[in-house]
Image: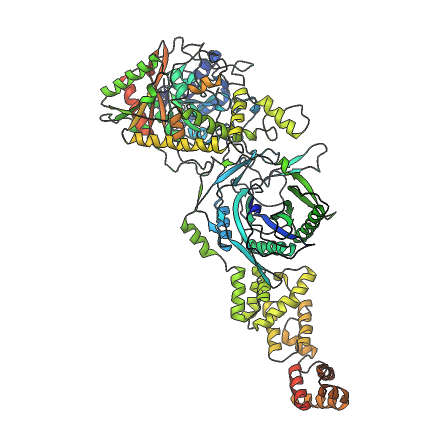
Amino acid sequence: MGVAGLAAALRERKISAVEAAAHHLARIRSHQALGAFVALDDELTLAQARAADARIAAGSAAPLEGVPIAHKDIFVTADLPTTAGSRILAGYRSPFDATVVRKLAEAGAVTLGKLSCDEFAMGSANENVAVPALGFDHPVPVRNPWDSERIPGGSSGGSAVAVAAGLAPGATGTDTGGSIRQPASFCGVTGIKPTYGRASRYGMVAFASSLDQAGPMARSAEDCALLLSAMCGPDPERDSTSLARPAEDFSRQLAGSLDGLRIGVPKEFFGAGVAPGVRAAVEGALAEYEKLGARRVEITLPRTELSIPVYYIIAAAEASSNLSRFDGVKFGHRAKHYRDLADMYAQTREEGFGDEVKRRIMIGTYVLSHGYYDAYYLQAQKVRRMIADDFQQAFAQCDLIAGPAAPSVAWKLGEHGGDPVADYLADIFTLPASLAGLPGMSVPAGFDAGLPVGLQLIGNYFAEAKLLNAAHAFQQATDWHRRWPAGF
Amino acid sequence: MSEINTFEAAQSGRPTGPLVRGYEVIIGFETHAQLSTVSKIFSRASTAFGAEPNTQACAVDLALPGTLPVMNKGAVERAIRLGLALGSTIAPRSVFARKNYFYPDLPKGYQISQFEIPVVQGGSVSFFVGDEPKTVRLVRAHLEEDAGKSLHEDFVGQSGIDLNRAGTPLLEIVTEPDMRSTAEAVAYARELHKIVTWIGICDGNMQEGSFRCDANVSVRRPGDKLGTRREIKNLNSFKFMQQAIDYEIRWQIEEIEDGRAIQQATVLFDPDSGETRAMRTKEDAADYRYFPDPDLPPLAIAAEWIERVRAEMPELPRAMAERYVREHGLSDYDAAQLTQSPALAAYFQGAVAAGANAKLASNWITGEIARRLNQQDLAITEAPVTASQLARLVARIGDGTISNNAARQVFDALWTGEGQDVDAVIEAKGLKQMSDSGALEKIVDGVLATNQRNIDEYRAGKEKAFNALVGQVMKASQGKANPAQVNALLKAKLG
């Protein structure tokens, strides 16, 4: 049962919040081999569920009352440990909840543990995990329920898997360069990244501040609409980049007709690098949209390829600075043996960070260094602006943009063999919208050799309602999002 | 902000200052003024001084994961006030940047500051060195956060970190290298200190570190290109500032005279030894990897905001001093003295409002009162003699009731609390001047009758002899004679 269905059943008291919580806790335990969860507290979850039941009984149920939601371990939580997938935060407990966590709790959601992710959200495969998963005494990569030998995508891999395997009706994720949309695509679930600034970043362990956005992952656009409505809203006293755009009830805006909707199809999203099976599934989805009354418009996003170097410069630059606070002085890991202060920093960070994190800190440090700043960071910012301008030109011709969320389906665990560039190239279709700060989503649109393919929809700023409406209409006409992986 | 090399700016057209052993001295300042906001620049923690370590550091100040900075409007408003006071441009859009470096008392591993586009640009500070007017140009003033403190003394083999100060708002005020002597540098710092306290943006407490100066000092032979500078850090009293800069100038000249080149360096002044010592040299200079802080949108200041602040600005000391010169005929120097602080100016204005002759009141305030305040280490607000008492005293001098000498006695009685009412003190002490010209004339005649030698000398052209006669009359009247009247009478009688 999805978020919307479960919320309705809870309100109608067809099921209790405690029953819903217990059901999901049991599923999590029986599928811990997936490695999706890193923290779980049954008592905490059940206590919250009992409180939700009491509110339902008292007739004061909030929209998500009693619905269990799991959180990507990049959101800080007061009641559960927060690691961001990193050894350097081993044992860390935040004194406060992330705004998104708090808002979901205020909307009645019950916290269902913390989900595995790539360390500091840096990764496209959820293989860069440095903390043990639930039921393990060592770090494990998250496995894709459609094929347990394959990666789930990343960095919100745990979130995608929890939803795809029915361990949680919905989950939070974060998207910096595609970390919601790409794993949603690989696991056959629905995920949306809102416009940059719509959801507060307060309490999200920062990776790249100008790109990080929170969003929901769930079984349908309808479910995402319900979750996103609760997650968004201004947070001016906590996050200066949070926008003064009032919260919206996206669930009320799902019924619109697609008649005359202009869907822009960028030719750069259908080049030689796209797997034929992915292309076929996406073309099928576009044909479906035309049946629903939408019109296909050919557009161009000429700087799509440039988004890869631009992203890996800007994100790395910001990360290199954001991660400086993990220095062994105030919290988290500190090396046991060191000679002096400089050595303490070096040993702590050497021991605490994984390879991919170190790689990005080094790249980021380099591109910000004296003598290189103009050629890399500044130049990347200029091209970033051009990429955003390209989108505005495109939106003069269309209402939404559609294409594949990723060039391929999920690859095999270890297939990239530690080649980071192979991972980076797989982000090509999600990076442009991230750099422009635009909302984007991934909607299940078919299969390639038994593995899910996601259709990416990109909207203009604040077009979340339009996106969700288009996705919902598609899901009313198709059943890709209702498919379950075998054994779940 | 030593990485912005204003020091190399061309100095053509600036007058050469007094030479020290044949060298010209060139000084530029960077001052950190702690802004008087209740809460920190990017968090809601208190900025109050002196709390137990780490009790005034919230999650944002501790840089806990997930925390983000939110700009304190009060800090921006104070920057606007400074810009308006110094005739600077207030940037409609300025940018916060991260200055990246590792240090235990820097919780985020970077300091949020402003780099390429500061909030206050240009402007100047004008003041007097003695009677000589000087103007020092500002490069900029930018907002930034303070770091915490490392406590090395209290922990054996370890250091303590106190983050109460982390995130305290600072305005770093940077000058052009316009100063040409220690005296000018100290006068600049005093003037800037006066302005920031006057406009209420900084409490000016130098001991608590609310106003800290870094002096960039170099020397050169007149006409040569600029010498290599050394930066004296954290000068937290005007006395040390003077000693440190004087020492540094001597040291640099001796180095050059001994054939050694000056190395660019950051130095600290040790008040115990009276010497400056290098902390780090240019080779150690870090690459701070400045970049715009993505957590903070550019700071936009609308023209209406500036106008709102302008409307609330107090009259500035210079404008006030110019008004005193214009309205009360005071000298530039006296007017500048009276406008050292709002409280002092208020005292003067209080006396004038109570009817005092402005010039006389000014003389008393800048003379006797200043001397006694200084001696007893009192603020003007603590002066035992009120402005209205001073006004009454001055009035009694003006109307000839008492002489200046008698006035001093009255003043002393008021100051020590011996009396409260000016007239009552005059009465009690019998200090009234002789107003009966018949009685005075008798005394004058008596003095003239017994001092023929002085009369002869005076007639022979000796001015001193006249003064001796006046003195004799004053003595004979027990100080009660009006000196002006005595003068007139003597002149009349001596023809």
* Image quadrant occupied by the C terminus of chain A: top left
**Horizontal arrangement in the rendering, residue A322 relative to residue A334 (left or right):** left
Q: Establish if A162 lies above or below B203.
A: above
Image coordinates for residue B130, horizontal then vertical, percent:
62, 62
**Horizontal arrangement in the rendering, residue A72 relative to residue B26 (left or right):** left
Image coordinates for residue A273, horizontal then vertical, percent:
37, 16
Image coordinates for residue B437, horizontal then vertical, percent:
65, 88
Q: Foreground: A150 or B43? A: A150
Q: Foreground: A11 or A420? A: A420
For the image shown, how many numbered marks are present on the structure? Answer: 0
* Image quadrant occupied by the N terminus of chain A: top left
Which scheme is used to colour this image of the protein?
Answer: rainbow
Image coordinates for residue A235, horizontal then vertical, percent:
43, 36
Q: Establish if B429 lies above or below A209.
A: below
Which quarter of the picture shows residue A13? Answer: top left
**Horizontal arrangement in the rendering, residue A21 relative to residue A355 (left or right):** left
Residue A277 in view here: yes
Residue A59 in view here: no
Q: Foreground: A334 or A306? A: A306
Q: Foreground: B243 or A103? A: B243
